[in-house]
Image (cartoon, coloured by chain):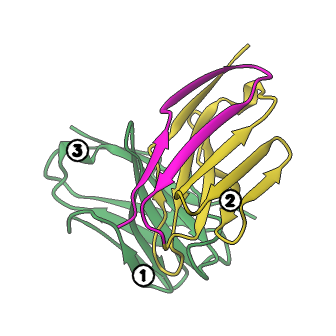
Chain colours: A yellow, B green
Amino acid sequence: GENVEQHPSTLSVQEGDSAVIKCTYSDSASNYFPWYKQELGKRPQLIIDIRSNVGEKKDQRIAVTLNKTAKHFSLHITETQPEDSAVYFCAASKGGADGLTFGKGTHLIIQP
Amino acid sequence: KAGVTQTPRYLIKTRGQQVTLSCSPISGHRSVSWYQQTPGQGLQFLFEYFSETQRNKGNFPGRFSGRQFSNSRSEMNVSTLELGDSALYLCASSFGGTTNEKLFFGSGTQLSVL
């Protein structure tokens, strides 16, 4: 089955700096790559997703890039703010009836 | 529109007991999937139901089972509880066309097995 590796497990950045979280996947048939944000004590929420027919997608301060050849995708957050502090999960799916395979999460800490 | 509702919020059980968790999806959503979340392991896929049928299953033992009712509400059952089953159990709903769509998560049921 699919295997998703996520790095780093913890990332500490200064407020205003950029943060990058990287994920690799094993199944070349995967074609959907969402990112979920989970604030402390809250439910995971989708923040951005990308499909295999595009290489990059942006939404304000958040962007995701996908390299299908290397089988990796990354989340980029620019101009980080205190409310960006959370655990971020990447995931991959082949679609159809297959479930999402999640990475183990990255705890992003924004230092004031 | 009400969000995904999970009950109960917290559960404490002892080894060997069984437990049933409930999930009510967003109105109109026909797919419900279940995930186990533990520190350091992230979210692990348990199973997914669509129109009362299990469409996919993750790599969990047969002690973990589920079902979905005609109103799309879903229940998850764990029998013969083990200490390692202590976790946050999250359900998520979606319209259900495929899994390549946004999942809406509930707040989860925190299960503690003593």
List the residue tagged with mark 3. Answer: B84
- What segment carries the magenta color? A1-28
| Residue type pointed to by label 3 | Gly
Residue A19 among those drawn in magenta: yes
Q: Is residue B24 left or right of residue B109?
A: right
The residue drawn where x is 26% and y is 48% is: B85
Point out the residue furthest to the top here: A112
Looking at the picture, how far across and down is residue B92, in whole percent? 54, 62
User: What secondary structure is found at the residue carrying circle 2?
Assistant: strand
| Residue type pointed to by label 2 | Asp
N-term-proximal mark, 1 vs 3:
1
Which mark identifies residue B55? 1
User: What secondary structure is found at the residue carrying circle 1?
Assistant: strand
For the residues beneath circles 2 and 3, the answer to whether they share a chain is no
The residue drawn where x is 66% and y is 21% is: A13
List the residue tagged with mark 2. Answer: A49
For the residues beneath circles 1 and 2, the answer to whether they share a chain is no
Looking at the picture, how far across and down is residue A77, in whole percent? 74, 37
Q: Chain of mark 3?
A: B
The residue drawn where x is 48% and y is 80% is: A97
Q: Eyeballing the image, is B109 above or below A50?
A: above
- Mark 1 vs mark 2: in front: 2
Q: Is residue A86 left or right of residue A96?
A: right
Task: State the residue in front, A91 or A40.
Answer: A91
